[in-house]
Amino acid sequence: MGDTSSRLIAEAAAANLAAITYYFGSKDELIAAALAAELREWTQPALDRLAAPDDPAQRLLETVEILGTAFEQHRDRVPGLLEVFVHTARNDDPSNPIAAVWTQVRGRLAAVIDELRSRSVIAEWVDPNAMAALIVAVVAGTVVNETVDTAGPGHRAVAAQFAGLLLRARPAA
């Protein structure tokens, strides 16, 4: 986020330089807002799939597929997104737009996991909120891993392993 000046952004947008500070507070916050909008666009199909009324296990598996496809389509944007995640980690403002997207994804996942648990598809000991946070962390870690270790297992293989583990956490017979 530090490579682009506020002046260049204002010129590209044909806007007044002061508008950045007035509307966003800083250049970094403007970039975070723009990337949050982009992240929301990438994750919206997954959020919509998670909210569908059909089989929760199928929704979860198809959401993994949707996210994998989004990652492949936007792979070139991943380094910038990772930089925003680091910036967000240093920002304790709960209204941060990246944190809002992250929280919404975690919330929808938790609802599906709770539904899987209530239907006895997965074990009762699985905590929906903790498992949803774990899934989000695994997805983020997988993105970092595939970006850094290009020769390692791909995101689809990791996602398949993780989804298989979750869906095999069945209640005791």
Image: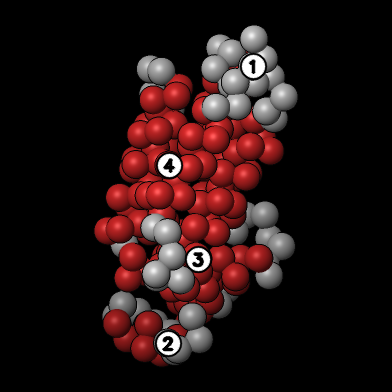
Q: CA distance from mark 2 to mark 4?
A: 38 Å
Q: Earlier in the sequence, mark 3 or mark 2?
A: 2
Residue mark closest to the camera, 3 vs 2: 3
Dot 3 amino acid type: Val
The residue nearer to you, when weighing 44 against 122, is 122
Dot 4 amino acid type: Ala
Q: Residues within 10 Å of mark 3 (few under 14, many from 20)?
A: some
Q: Residue at x 56, y 44 (%)?
A: 135
Circle 1 SS class = loop
Residue mark closest to the camera, 1 vs 2: 1
Q: Residue at x 67, y 54 (%)?
A: 94
Q: Residue at x 31, y 77 (%)?
A: 13
Q: Residues within 10 Å of mark 4 (few under 14, many from 20)?
A: few
Residue 160: assigned label: 4
Query: Is residue 80 visible in the rendered structure shown here?
Result: no
Q: Earlier in the sequence, mark 4 or mark 3?
A: 3
Q: Earlier in the sequence, mark 4 or mark 1?
A: 4
Residue mark closest to the camera, 3 vs 1: 1
Residue 171: assigned label: 1
Q: Are marks 4 and 3 in contact (CB under 8 Å)?
A: no
Dot 1 amino acid type: Pro
Q: Are marks 3 and 2 in contact (CB under 8 Å)?
A: no
Circle 4 SS class = helix
Q: Is residue 147 above or below residue 61?
A: below
Q: Residue at x 49, y 80 (%)?
A: 1
Q: CA distance from mark 4 to mark 1?
A: 21 Å
Residue 144: assigned label: 3
Residue 79: x %, y % from top left: 43, 73
Residue 4: assigned label: 2
Circle 2 SS class = loop
